[in-house]
């Protein structure tokens, strides 16, 4: 699985180290954020969140970027990761769906 930052060729001269030489944000995964799911570095925006809005919500990359207040480049980085790792995206979606169904099952009817 993904751990830390994906390989990159060269870092831009930024203090945060969150962009490549081309200015594209990195996709990272750390166990303490989003349960280790891949996300856009410096945010809690998961690749799966971006992917779902693009695929299921029919949003354009620009609409996704505006909705999350991130760059279009960050959206494209997340989508590239998602399309390059379809099995992982299906696993995340299945796990999220199961958690939602369990929460729904445990929620009292009158809430």
Image (cartoon, rainbow, N blue to C red):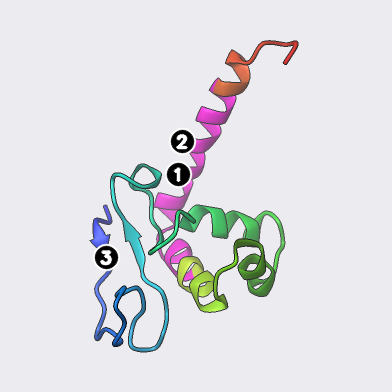
Residue shown at the point (49%, 72%) measured from the top left: 74
Q: Nearer the viewer, residue 1 or 50?
A: 50
x, y (%) of residue 16? Answer: 31, 73
Residue 31, position in %: x, y? 28, 45
Identify the residue at image location x=39%, y=88%. 22
Q: Does residue 16 appear left or right of residue 62 in this picture? A: left
Can you say whether 32 is above or below 85 in the image? above
Q: Which residue is mark 2?
A: 95
Q: Residue sitting at 56 percent across and 59 percent down?
A: 51
Residue 8 falls left or right of residue 67: left
- Closer to us: mark 1 or mark 3? 3
- Residue 23, percent from left and from top: 41, 84
Asked where in the image residue 19 lies, by quadrant, the reply is bottom left
Residue nearest the viewer, comparing 110 with 14: 14
Residue 101 lies in magenta, yes or no? yes
Question: At numbered mark 1, what does the secondary structure look like: helix, strand or loop?
Answer: helix
Q: Main secondary structure of the magenta part?
A: helix
Q: Which residue is mark 3?
A: 5
Instruction: Determine crowd level at label 3: few under 14, some 14-19, many 20+ residues with C-alpha closer than 10 A.
Output: some
**On residue 80, which mark appears?**
none
Callout 1 touching callout 2 (CB < 8 Å): yes
For the residues marked 1 and 2, what is the alpha-carbon distance in whole angstroms? 5 Å
The residue closer to the viewer here, 84 or 102, is: 102
Write down the region rendered in magenta. 80-102
Query: In which quadrant is the C terminus drawn?
Result: top right
Instruction: State the separation of the CA atoms marked 1 and 3.
Output: 19 Å
53 left or right of 14?
Answer: right
Whole-number angstrom distance, CA of label 3 to CA of label 2: 23 Å
Mark carried by residue 92? 1
In the structure shown, which secondary structural element does the residue marked by tag 3 occupy? strand
User: Which comes before the other along the chain, label 3 or label 2?
Assistant: 3
Would you call the spot at circle 1 few (<14 residues within 10 Å), some (14-19), or many (20 or more)? some
């Amino acid at each position: 699985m993904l751990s830390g930052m994906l390989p990159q060729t060269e870092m831009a001269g930024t203090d945060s180290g969150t962009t490549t030489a081309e200015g594209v944000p990195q996709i990272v995964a750390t166990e303490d954020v989003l349960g280790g799911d891949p996300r856009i570095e410096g945010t809690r925006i998961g690749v799966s969140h971006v992917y779902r809005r693009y695929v299921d919500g029919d949003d354009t990359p620009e609409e996704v970027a505006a909705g999350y207040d991130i760059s279009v480049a960050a959206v494209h980085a997340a989508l590239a990761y998602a399309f390059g790792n379809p099995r992982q995206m299906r696993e995340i979606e299945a796990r999220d769906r199961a958690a939602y169904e369990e929460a729904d099952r445990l929620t009292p009817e009158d809430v």
